[in-house]
Amino acid sequence: MTTAESASPSSSSPSAAPGGFDLGALLAERGAERYALHSKYLNPQLPRMLHTIGFDKVYERAEGAHFFDAEGHDHLDMLAGFGVMGLGRHHPVVRRALHDVLDLSLADLTRFDCQPLPGLLAEKLLTHSPHLDRVFFGNSGTEAVETALKFARYATGRPRVLYCEHAFHGLTTGSLSVNGESGFRDGFAPLLPDTAVPLGDLDALARELRKGDVAALIVEPIQGKGVHEAPPGYLRAAQELLHRHKALLIADEVQTGLGRTGDFYAYQHEEGVEPDLVCVAKALSGGYVPVGATLGRDWIFKKVYSSMDRVLVHSASFGSNAQAMAAGLAVLAVMENEQVVAHARAVGERLKSRLTALIDEYELLADVRGRGLMIGIEFGRPASLKLRSRWAMLQAARKGLFAQMVVVPLLQRHRILTQVSGDHLEVIKLIPPLVITDQDADRFVEAFTDVMDDAHTGGGLMWDFGRTLIKQAVAHR
């Protein structure tokens, strides 16, 4: 019997429940209450939203890029937990590494020793960005961004960080200060005095840098909201401008990193780009243990940690814990051994190519963009009068409803999980596990084609659901 099998929670025998706690039994007894429990004790709007759009499914288990319901039907995951499940769910190598690290009973998080796993993971991560030298481990993407903001400010002695319009860098206070979406920021002021510039606008960047108080520019090489890529040459030119003004370039690779875009990091698509700080998280976790990492240049780290008095000036209580480090090491080993980055590039090119070919067939389909397995599908105003009137009705109620109309039948009719790319956007973002197959990609295209056929008939259940969404949107204005 394997370690994974011996640790199965399905057994409810007394020997499997030390201390009287049996997780499998608890889930068997109370699992059916999942939506009621969330409504009563957690975010009350989540179950309400799921019920409204018909996403209130019950998934029993998951493997790779697929969920399975109680009847054994598979659902294709094209969302990957917002990018966390880069290797899919329950990859056996990552799972085994976590069993192993628990069985080793390591003296973890003593705070006053140096365990080997953090150093080994840092060493491995840095091989993918050889111009960087050191790593700080936290517990999430927003924590990786917070670290980069603090380090940039301290290293440069300047207070202001520039960010791009429509950016998303996290929801804690510092990260929220460089978040380009007002819907997330509203009601949480005052935030840090940072400044937005348009993605790709070098003149706007130069104007802000001339003020002399800019510590850094933080940028997603491909923005998650809307899947907008930095224009060719922008990152390198921005880097040169920043360094000329003694400011730093921070690359937020929390979602785009670790193979998502067909290279290990998305900034590597552009030759000569060497960010001073790089933020990663999500896929590094293997989908099991939260982890975030901030990679940086040696001089930046040495300036922050300049003396023994400052040894704990920036730290995280759970940072560098053994389980997270083991998961990260296993993830990087799988990516190398199974050539995950090359696979993501090839399948992504196939998927994007097939979707792009549909633009001329469907007037509601405006654009397909992205890199690797980070693809945005944008819908736009149709030409025909009948469809144009329906489109206008949706837009008047709330922008983004048509994209939601596409997402729902993909799940309900075709058992494919996707989601819109952001509030008030007519864009679906595909960020599936990097291990999806050509057959999975073809399954999505065939399902998407069916849904678009339905949308262009101007009738049927899809537009009936659209009317329901319009009523909901109007009622909650």
Image: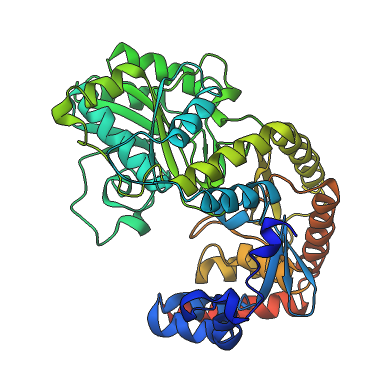
Q: Residue at coordinates 83% horizontally, 64% vertically from top-left? A: 450
Identify whether 366 is placed above or below 54.
above
Q: How is the image coloured?
A: rainbow
x and y percentages locating residue 33 in the rendered image: 54, 87
Residue 278 visible in the snapshot:
yes
Query: Where does the C terminus fall, quadrant-wise?
Result: bottom left
Identify whether 11 is placed above or below 99.
below
Locate residue 172 relative to residue 445 in the image: left or right: left
Q: Return the residue nearer the eye: 380 or 322.
A: 322
Q: Residue at coordinates 34% horizontally, 27% vertically from top-left? A: 204
Residue 113 picture quarter: top left
Number of numbered callouts drawn? 0
Q: Return the residue nearer the eye: 25 or 80.
A: 25
Residue 245 picture quarter: top left
x and y percentages locating residue 282 in the rendered image: 52, 47
Locate residue 346 relative to residue 98 in the image: left or right: right
Identify whether 8 is placed above or below 242.
below
Q: Residue at coordinates 76% horizontally, 49% vertically from top-left? A: 436
Q: Return the residue nearer the eye: 463 or 429.
A: 429
Q: Residue furthest left?
A: 309
Locate residue 296 relative to residue 256 in the image: left or right: left
x and y percentages locating residue 405 in the rendered image: 65, 69
x and y percentages locating residue 425 in the rendered image: 53, 56
Residue 469 visible in the snapshot:
no
